Image (cartoon, grey):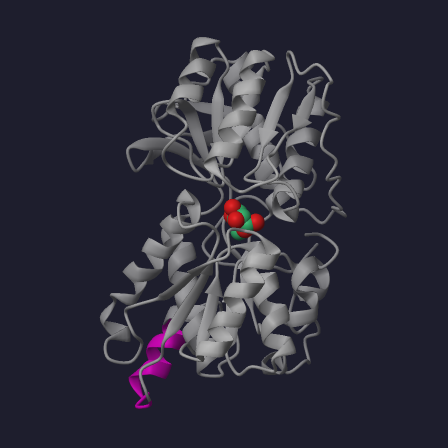
């Protein structure tokens, strides 16, 4: 059993299975009629590939057919064009991580009229058209933990083994009299709903009096569009400006690009965020007795992405076969999946819409990285 550091509580356990994603998109030209389509923000993103791995595995076990269809570009327009083609092809369902809040209404309406349910996962789709959103972990927790980690890393403090980063931050800042700490954010696109939600929650955390006068309430934000080249350019800009103490990158593409840039530049800027252990192993400590601060990213977090994709598959399956409509209090059963037991998910109010909660953030640090590198 994998020893994990869980923040918050969960009835589920992470998967220990090997999880190398099959990133192949279905050959274009194949008929997609009756197929459950999973659409990520763009191709070439391991986070999306791993979600699809779980989605496909869950639905295949149910005897369903799935396909992975994402645009090459991380834009609303590119997703809308592809969505339009999927509706025409009479797909069975669409499960999507969106690139923006606006611009989807017309095509989502067309899908709805064609009886094609839309479930969002990771990055929300409009509440007017989705059955439900599958939330990876509480946004407020993610925003708060990322700020706490960035402040601790700036102060050279290791991940507290008891998991209570807020207590460690409160203690450390109480006696801090140095210059005001300044944090940067290297995000995905300026429009991405999920990252913008996390950034708002980082700002909410920074408004806590614990940080007053010690950590700037203002985040220096840059956007790499979940593109490795653009993210590298933006990370280089942080190095050139040398105005922040630590970069928080709430995207697996951004954090990996920043890791490489900071390492190459031998920069003193710290790094944390949401990353995949497999992609971050060169920029993080990987053994319990490593000096965490010899690496550019001493610790970071994420959740079980494969399980998240499977949960989205279960929600979609319930919407198609079992009348799951996502109303507050409505629920669906998810079969046992890998190391996870069968679970009942219940929809709750989330903003103006509804969601089900798939997991909690895990901290990856020197004490557990070795166990996760081959998993995620
Ligand atoms: C990236 C994507 C995705 C996000 C993860 C953490 O791969 O931007 O939307 O949730 O990172």
State left or right for residue 25 relative to residue 270. right
Q: Residue at x 49, y 83 (%)?
A: 156
Magenta region: 167-178
Foreground residue among 250 and 188:
188
State left or right for residue 282 relative to residue 331. right
State left or right for residue 132 relative to residue 374. left
Q: Residue at x 29, y 80 (%)?
A: 214
Q: Residue at x 68, y 75 (%)?
A: 288
- Dominant secondary structure of the residues highlighted in magenta in the image: helix
Image quadrant where residue 365 sits: bottom right
Residue 290, horizontal then vertical, whole percent: 68, 80
Q: Is residue 8 above or below residue 235?
A: above
Q: Is residue 211 visible?
A: yes
Q: Is residue 278 above or below residue 150?
A: above
Q: Is residue 363 visible?
A: no
Foreground residue among 152 and 116:
116
* Quarter the N terminus occupies: bottom right
Q: Is residue 53 above or below residue 327?
A: below
Q: Residue at x 57, y 44 (%)?
A: 12
Residue 138, horizontal then vertical, whole percent: 41, 48
Q: Is residue 169 magenta?
A: yes
Q: Is residue 179 magenta?
A: no
Residue furthest top in the image: 114
């Amino acid at each position: 059993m994998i020893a994990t550091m869980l923040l918050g509580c969960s009835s589920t356990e992470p998967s220990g299975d090997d999880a190398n994603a099959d990133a192949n998109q279905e050959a274009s030209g194949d008929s997609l009629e009756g197929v459950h389509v999973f659409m990520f923000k763009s191709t070439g993103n391991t986070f999306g590939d791993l979600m699809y791995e779980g989605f496909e595995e869950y639905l295949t076990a149910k005897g369903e057919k799935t396909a992975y269809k994402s645009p090459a570009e991380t834009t609303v327009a590119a997703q809308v064009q592809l969505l339009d083609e999927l509706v025409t092809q009479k797909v069975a369902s669409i499960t999507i991580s969106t690139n923006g809040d606006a611009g989807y209404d017309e095509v989502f309406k067309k899908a709805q009229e064609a009886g094609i349910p839309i479930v969002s996962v990771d990055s929300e789709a409009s509440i007017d058209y989705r059955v439900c959103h599958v939330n990876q972990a509480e946004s407020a927790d993610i925003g708060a933990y990322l700020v706490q980690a960035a402040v601790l890393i700036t102060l050279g403090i290791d991940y507290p083994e008891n998991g209570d980063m807020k207590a460690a931050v409160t203690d450390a800042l109480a006696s801090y009299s140095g210059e005001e700490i300044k944090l940067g954010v290297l995000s995905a696109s300026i429009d991405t709903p999920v990252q913008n939600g996390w950034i708002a929650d980082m700002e909410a955390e920074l408004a806590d009096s614990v940080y007053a006068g010690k950590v700037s309430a203002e985040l220096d934000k840059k956007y790499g569009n979940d593109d490795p080249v653009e993210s590298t350019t933006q990370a280089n800009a942080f190095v050139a400006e040398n105005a922040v103490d630590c970069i928080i990158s709430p995207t697996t593409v951004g954090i990996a690009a920043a890791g490489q840039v900071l390492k190459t530049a031998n920069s003193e800027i710290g790094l944390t965020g949401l990353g995949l252990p497999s992609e971050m192993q060169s920029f993080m400590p990987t053994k319990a007795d490593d000096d965490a601060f010899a690496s550019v990213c001493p610790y970071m977090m994420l959740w079980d992405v494969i399980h998240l994709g499977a949960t989205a598959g279960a929600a979609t399956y319930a919407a198609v076969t079992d009348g799951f409509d996502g109303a507050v209090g409505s629920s669906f059963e998810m079969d046992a999946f890998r190391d996870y037991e069968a679970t009942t998910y219940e929809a709750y109010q989330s903003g103006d819409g509804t969601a089900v909660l798939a997991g909690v953030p895990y901290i990856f640090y020197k004490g557990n990285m070795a166990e996760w590198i081959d998993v995620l």
